C-alpha cells in the first residue's frame, strides 16, 4: 500500500497548530520587548546620564544619546540579600559577599554569556597553537642533515671516482671485482668525444648512437652517464617526449 503525503491544507489540525506556534512566537517577542522597556524605564546612562536606553541583547544595553554600551545587570542590579554589587562570571552573575549566584533581571530567556572571557580564551588557545607550531618548526629545522657540498667534475679517473664513492656510501668497492668479470672500464672522455661528434649542431636519437663497447647494456649505462655530465657542461640538451623517447640536441 502506498502512503500519499497530503498537503497542509488537507490537515487542518497541523495547520492550526502551526498558526498557533507563529502567534506564540510573535507574542513572546512583544512580551520580551515590553519587559525590557519596563526594566530600563527611566534608567540613566552610566556615561552621559540620559534615560534613552535600549536592550541590544540579553544583559547588554546601549544609550541612544551617546551610543555607549554596557551591562545593565552590573550597573543597576545588586544582591537581593546584602545589596552588594554583582560581578559577571562565565555563565552567571555572582555576589562576592554572599558567595552565591544571582539571577539577572536583564536576561529574559538566555544564559549569561561573558564575551570578553571567551574572547580571551580563544586568544590564549590560538597563542598556544602558534607556539606549538613554532616549536615543531624548530625541531624539524634542527633535525635536518647538513648540506652536501657539490662534487667536482668527473675527470675520467675511475680510481678517483671509486674512492669518492667509497667515502660516500662507506662501503669499499674493490676495482678487482670489475676485472674479475672482464668488464670494460668506463672511459668517459672517449664517450664524450664520440657523442659530441655525432650530436654537434643537430638532434640525434639516444638509442641511435653507435656503441663503444660490445656489452650493449653496459654501453647504454656509460652513454647515459656521459650525456648527463655533458648536459651539465652545456654541451648538449636532453629532450624527452611523453612516450619516454630520449633525444640529444647538440650545441
Image (cartoon, rainbow, N blue to C red):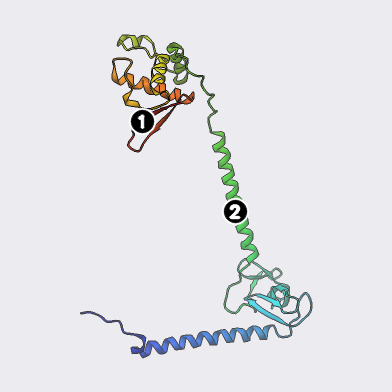
- Outermost residue, left side: 1
- 193 relative to 73 in the view: left or right: left
- 86 relative to 196 in the view: left or right: right
Marking on residue 246: 1
Marking on residue 101: none
Residue 10, percent from left and from top: 33, 89
At 48% across and 25% down in the image, what residue appears?
A: 232
- Outermost residue, front side: 201
Front disc: 2 or 1: 1
Image quarter for residue 149? top right
Residue 86, percent from left and from top: 70, 72
Which residue position is annotated with label 2?
Answer: 126
Residue 23, percent from left and from top: 50, 88
Quarter that holds the N terminus: bottom left
Can you say whether 166 is above or below 82 in the image? above
Task: Identify the element where label 2 is drawn.
Answer: helix
Is the residue marked by circle 1 packed among few (<14), some (14-19), or many (20+) residues within 10 Å? Answer: some
Q: Which of 185 and 44 is in front in this view?
A: 185
At 64% across and 76% down in the image, what residue appears?
A: 56
Query: Nearer the N terminus, badge 2 or badge 1?
Result: 2
Is the residue marked by circle 2 packed among few (<14), some (14-19), or many (20+) residues within 10 Å? Answer: few
Q: Which of 27 and 227 is in front in this view?
A: 227
Amino acid at each position: 500500500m502506498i502512503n500519499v503525503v497530503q498537503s497542509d491544507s488537507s490537515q487542518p489540525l497541523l495547520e492550526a497548530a502551526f498558526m498557533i506556534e507563529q502567534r506564540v512566537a510573535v507574542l513572546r517577542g512583544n512580551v520580551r520587548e515590553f519587559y525590557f522597556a519596563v526594566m530600563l524605564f527611566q534608567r540613566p546612562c552610566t556615561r552621559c546620564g540620559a534615560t534613552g536606553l535600549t536592550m541590544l541583547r540579553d544583559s547588554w544595553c546601549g544609550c541612544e544619546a551617546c551610543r555607549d554600551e554596557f551591562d545593565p545587570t552590573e550597573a543597576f542590579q545588586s544582591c537581593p540579600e546584602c545589596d552588594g554589587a554583582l560581578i559577571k562570571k562565565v555563565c552567571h552573575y555572582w555576589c562576592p559577599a554572599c558567595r552565591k549566584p544571582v539571577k539577572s533581571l536583564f536576561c529574559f530567556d538566555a544564559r549569561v554569556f561573558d564575551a570578553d572571557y571567551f574572547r580571551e580564551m580563544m586568544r590564549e588557545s590560538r597563542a598556544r597553537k602558534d607556539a606549538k607550531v613554532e616549536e615543531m618548526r624548530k625541531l624539524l629545522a634542527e633535525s635536518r642533515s647538513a648540506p652536501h657540498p657539490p662534487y667536482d667534475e668527473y675527470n675520467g679517473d675511475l680510481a678517483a671516482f671509486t674512492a669518492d664513492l667509497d667515502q660516500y656510501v662507506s662501503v669499499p668497492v674493490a676495482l678487482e671485482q670489475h676485472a674479475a668479470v672482464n668488464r670494460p672500464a668506463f672511459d668517459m672522455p672517449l664517450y664524450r668525444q664520440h657523442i659530441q661528434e655525432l650530436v654537434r649542431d643537430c638532434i640525434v636519437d639516444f638509442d641511435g648512437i653507435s656503441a663503444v663497447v660490445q656489452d650493449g647494456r653496459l654501453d647504454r649505462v656509460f652513454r647515459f652517464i656521459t650525456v648527463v655530465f655533458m648536459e651539465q657542461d652545456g654541451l648538449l640538451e636532453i629532450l624527452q617526449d611523453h612516450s619516454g623517447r630520449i633525444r640529444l640536441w647538440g650545441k
